[in-house]
Image (cartoon, rainbow, N blue to C red):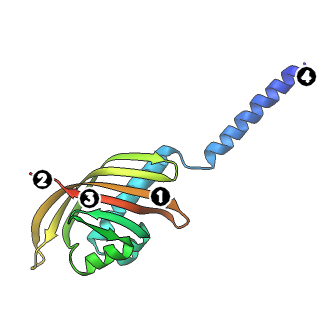
Amino acid sequence: MIFIRLILFIILFGLSVAASAQTGRPSSKNLEAELRQLDLAAAKAVLEKDEKAIARYFTKDSVTNNPRNGLTIGSEGVIQAARANVINYHSFDRVIESVQVLGKTVVIMGNETVVMKAKDGSAGETIRRRYTNIWMKTGAGWRIVARHANIICG
């Protein structure tokens, strides 16, 4: 009888620990949905040249392998490129194709279509590209630590 009670206690204790562990962190589907929203919000921040938002989404030491065949270093590098109109989009559409949750790191891949802004403010050249964003959970929340974007030829 004591043996059965001990087994029941172990089972119930194990189930309660497992249940509390699951409620302590978001499910992977919730986390994926959150990161999808953040990834789209980061694209919007770049489109709108929102410097505060860019600084919120990119870490100070992030690295972007940019589609101009160079590196953009940190949130400040992204902001400087926007100020210099190197990043100057009429529109920016991002399609997320894959979200891979790896603990405190999330890899997002997909494609982007940007329409450059012409000198008169109208729509200019359309550029299609592939992208990868690496998001990491930091003390300040989820932030982009690395990015790669390359133009699709042809």
Q: Mark 4 touching mark 3, by CB under 8 A?
A: no
Residue position for label 4 = 2
Upstream in sequence: badge 1 or badge 2: 1
Position of 70 compared to 29: left or right? left
Local packing at callout 2 (Cα closer than 10 Å; few below 14, some 14-19, many 20+) is few
Which label belongs to residue 152?
none
The image quarter containing residue 68 is bottom left
Looking at this view, is 54 or 151 the one in front? 151
Q: Residue at x 15, y 65 (%)?
A: 115
Mark 1 crowdedness (10 Å alpha carbons): few <14, some 14-19, many ≥20: some
CA–CA distance in space, label 1 to label 2: 30 Å
Q: Secondary structure at mark 2?
A: loop
Q: Residue at left 47%, top 58%?
A: 136
**In the displayed structure, would residue 107 be above or below residue 52?**
above
Question: Mark 1 or mark 4: which comes first in sequence?
Answer: 4
Q: Are marks 1 and 4 in contact (CB under 8 Å)?
A: no
Q: Are marks 2 and 4 in contact (CB under 8 Å)?
A: no
Residue 153's disc is 2
The residue carrying pointer 4 sits among few (fewer than 14), some (14 to 19) or many (20 or more) residues within 10 Å by Cα, namely few
* Residue 127, horizontal then vertical, whole percent: 15, 60
Q: Earlier in the sequence, mark 3 or mark 1?
A: 1
Horizontally, is 89 left or right of 11 in the view? left
Residue 117 makes an appearance in the image: yes
Secondary structure under tag 1 reads strand
